[in-house]
Image (cartoon, rainbow, N blue to C red):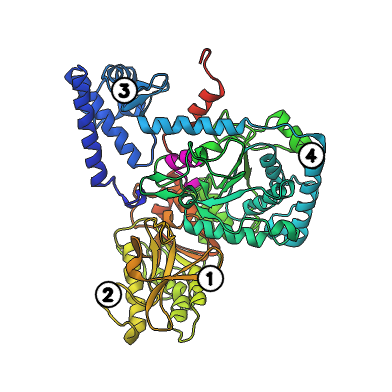
Amino acid sequence: MTREERTPIDAPARTLAEGFAQHIRAWSRERGADEAIQDAAAAAARAVSLALSDGHVCISLADLAASEALPRAPAGVEAWRRALLTAGVVGTADAPGQMPLVLDGDGRLYLHRYFDYERRLAERVWRAARAVPPMPAADRAVLRAQLAMLFAANTSSLGEVSGAVSGNEVDWQKLATALALRGRFTVISGGPGTGKTTTVVNLLACLIAQDAGCRIALAAPTGKAAARMSEAVRERAAHLPPAIRERLPAEASTIHRLLGVTPSGFVHHAGRRLAIDALVVDEASMLDLALATKLLEAVPDGARIVLLGDKDQLAAVESGAVFAELCADPTLSSACRDDLADLCDVARDAIAPPAPAHASSLHDASVWFTRNFRFAADSGIGRLAAAINAGDAEAALAVLAESDSGCEREGESESEPEGAATVSQREVQWIASVGPTPAPAAIEQLELGYAPYFDAVLGDATPPAAIVDAFARFRALCAVREGPHGVEAINARLTRRLRAMLGDRDHDPRSPWFVGRPVIVRRNDPVLKLFNGDIGIALRDAGGELLVHFPQAEGGLRAIAPLRLPEHETAFALTVHKAQGSEFDAVWVLLPAQANRVLSRELLYTAVTRARKRVTLCAGVEVLNRTIAAATRRHSGLLARLAEVATPRIGA
């Protein structure tokens, strides 16, 4: 069960936390701690375990001291510190030893394993970030010419959609490309349509031009994100010379496939590194602390690492907010700005990065793309996403209020508006009726959104590829799994709808399988080359056998018998977390009737930005207000670990 499915923290997580707390109590007792200290150690262990299940990497002593749920707890932060350091089970950042818990100098308490991940990741990132090899004048001149040619060709062939700039405006895509070529660690953050893929294609072209044998790996956390990355790279490569275009990586892989997942762990790791010269990871905001550490440690020291993502999207389902922390500070040093100005032929003073979200020791490594080339300045989706991201509920509601006047509002009649028999063609549609179940207008738009797909499934001669394409254009997204506003209820409703339309063609109503059933894989299966997040459609082959058809990164479909599939579920509707890394022409977004701890600004922003053309948002005013106001905060010390490796202790 994933974190977004738990409201509140689920019973298994609490059971695990209680069991860990009792182990810590016993270990502390064995080391001679008195009963009060044992209680404090157990309470802290329980809190850390629960925090991990909620996405945090650590907890703070200040939060422990402020908790009202800890009876007989030490009074104040310093009392907690003294109690834990005398419990015999807590190490320090300077001397973690083999202790199960670690307390750093700033009052962060960790499970030892997560403190170790954080320190290892900081060391690997810093080692890559400080590696800026000197560039001979001749190489610099060649690179300057390559950048000028690539971005000029990109502008003329792809125009504004791809991120072309004009006049004296600084081209941050070009600057980001130069930054990635200058060093060995780069983080590029930007929302959908800001030009990340265009930047990567031009970066790859430069690497290949410099070394035709350059070994490049493209990866993403999920199969869907990897497939979309492969497709986007192919689409954006039209302006490249044929000799370079032919050498681009054929496809992106999932991170698990790249590392070689086995039942006992990964094939590639710090002791057996990948045979690559460059790694580009898309949707890196989905990387949790553990996976990010293992991935970057598997990259050779001499290779370039480029992480792409959106710092404003949802963080990883598991613990950590690695991407947001690594790109928290886009500061560029004077020397770096000089280099970029020379390579990109721009004025040095024109290179003015935004103020950092958080101060960091990691400079000259991050670029934020803020200009959107997909949506016009007055675009409904663009304005709505920007308002949500800024935490401005008033502005977001103003954009929504401009939606079709036929949509329902709280307290109004549920009678069907004129023209309700067609899907709204407005960019943004708001259905604000609140009730114990989704409003009739919301369900109507849901079913109309899937109508082209249902028609494709019911067509007697529709090719499987056309059915898969029809399904890929629209998606229902929910914030929660359970309840009438959740994934399970929406999937059940759409299942009943399609099975009723199939009628006699639904051969076995007792089976969960039927023609047109979409399923999403929930567990990696390296043997079948199916990975968490892959989506397939159940269709009959020429002989009448029902098989699940999965699109392939290189094109075409692969059919697999339903009984062979790893863990899976129906996928008409997805949680917003599961949809991360995907894009659709249109999305239908359903929030629950009451606010809960799952809802956040980042979740709503992520949901809205899955849409290329249209968003239908089904949510009440109060829930929207509270969702937009609820910014996610992950407790972590990665920036502190980076500061430690950047300024090593004397004598260390």
Give the amino acid type for the residue marked by disc 1 in the picture: Gly
Circle 3 sits on which residue?
90
Q: Kindly report the distance in space between the C-alpha atoms of the residues bearing marks 1 and 3.
A: 54 Å
| Left or right of residue 340, residue 471 in this image | left
Frontmost of labels 1 and 3 is 1
- State the separation of the CA atoms marked 2 and 1: 28 Å
The segment highlighted magenta reads 285-295
Which one is in front, 324 or 218? 218
**Label 1 vs 4, first from the N-terminus:** 4
Kindly report the distance in space between the C-alpha atoms of the residues bearing marks 4 and 3. Answer: 52 Å
Tag 3 secondary structure: strand
Estimate the x, y position of residue 651 in percent, counting from the top left: 52, 12
Contact (Cβ within 8 Å) of mark 4 with mark 3: no
Mark 4 or 3: in front is 4
Disc nearest the viewer among 4 and 2: 4
Can I make out residue 428 in this image?
no
Q: Classify residue 183 as left or right of residue 148.
A: left
Magenta region includes residue 290? yes
First-in-chain label (4 vs 3): 3
Residue 288 lies, with reference to residue 75, above or below; the image says: below
Q: Report the disc number at residue 511.
A: 2
**Tag of residue 556:** 1
Q: Residues within 10 Å of mark 1 (few under 14, many from 20)?
A: few
Q: Quadrant of residue 547?
A: bottom left
- Marks 4 and 2 sit apart, C-alpha to C-alpha, by 64 Å
CA neighbours of label 2 inside 10 A, class few (<14), some (14 to 19), many (20+) = few
Frontmost residue, 125 versus 61: 125
Q: Which residue is mark 4?
A: 139
x 46%, y 76%: residue: 453
Where is residue 345 shown, x and y percent of the image? 81, 41
Mark 2 and mark 3: Cα distance apart in space:
53 Å
**Dot 1 or dot 3, earlier in sequence:** 3
